[in-house]
Amino acid sequence: MASKDWGDIDIREDIPHAGRMYDYMLGGTTHFESDRVASHAAGLEFPGGIDAARAGLRANRDFLGRAVRFMAEEAGIRQFLDLGTGIPSDDNTHAIALSVAPESKIVYVDNDPIVLAHAHELLSTTPETTTSYLYADIRDTDSILSQAAEILDFDQPIGLVVVAIMHFISDADDAHGLVSRLVGAVPSGSYLAVSHLASDVVPGLVELYDGISEKTHETFILRNREEFTGFFDGLELVDPGVTLVASWRNQPPDAGPDIFYAGVGRKP
């Protein structure tokens, strides 16, 4: 399901777009010349160059797969609410969850027109009764929870997937409060997986993303370890706790700087 007509989409090809740049850096196909130019310009400023930048983004994507697999295999989660889905790829949440448990239900949420344009790819591998898409803003938690409740059973544990999205939400928009409200709506035994660009790991990264914000007209708010850990207030952190993404669950980092914090927590 989608709450907006796929034909009602305004996509600017001339302005770089963070989601399309991310797709390009990961080897996807949903990007334009403006995205490629901006990606290479940013890569020149990244410590270690564009290959190191790609490794950092890939490490985040791989964390998504490991976190969902953990929730499906080890924790027995069969329902997932993925917020800030991003452009579809072959390692999205539903692909991982359904490979473990074909009966899983997944609801994707994103307010990005480019994601909406490709939403059918998120739904194409399974019946729409299993994998659904909501066109909504993460700031509108009441609407998201209301629509998701039509598909997911909120009396049973749910895996909340909030990967590489909260660094687009400012403190003025109450980033921590948004996550807290989502956690508050799911029952005991649910899990929360979060990754987030780190402000205190790689020197110059905040300034680099300030420059990307200017080019893309999107705003990146990097946070330090303490600020990131605050997303898990009231939850039991899954071993190994808060780490850099490539190190979560003992996965060695790829070459190049690791630029995201990551963690998974359980609601007691």
Image: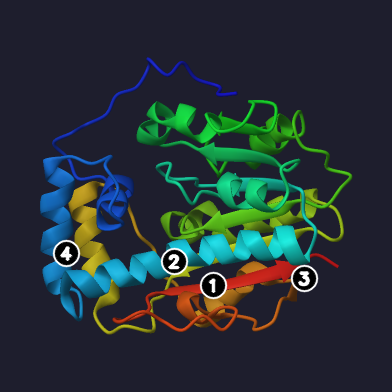
Q: Tag on residue 234? A: 3
- Compute the Cα span from label 3 to label 4: 37 Å
| Eye-nearest disc, 3 or 1 | 1
Is residue 207 visible in the rendered image? The answer is: no
- Compute the Cα span from label 2 to label 3: 24 Å
The residue to which callout 4 is attached is 42
Tell whether 15 sits left or right of 93. Answer: left
- Compute the Cα span from label 2 to label 4: 18 Å
First along the sequence among labels 2 and 3: 2
The residue lying toward the viewer, choosing from 218 and 62, is 62
x, y (%) of residue 102? 71, 43
| Eye-nearest disc, 2 or 4 | 2
CB atoms of marks 2 and 1 within 8 Å: yes
Q: Tag on residue 262? A: 1
Tell whether 210 sits left or right of 109. Answer: left
Callout 3 secondary element: loop
- Compute the Cα span from label 3 to label 1: 17 Å
The residue to which callout 2 is attached is 60
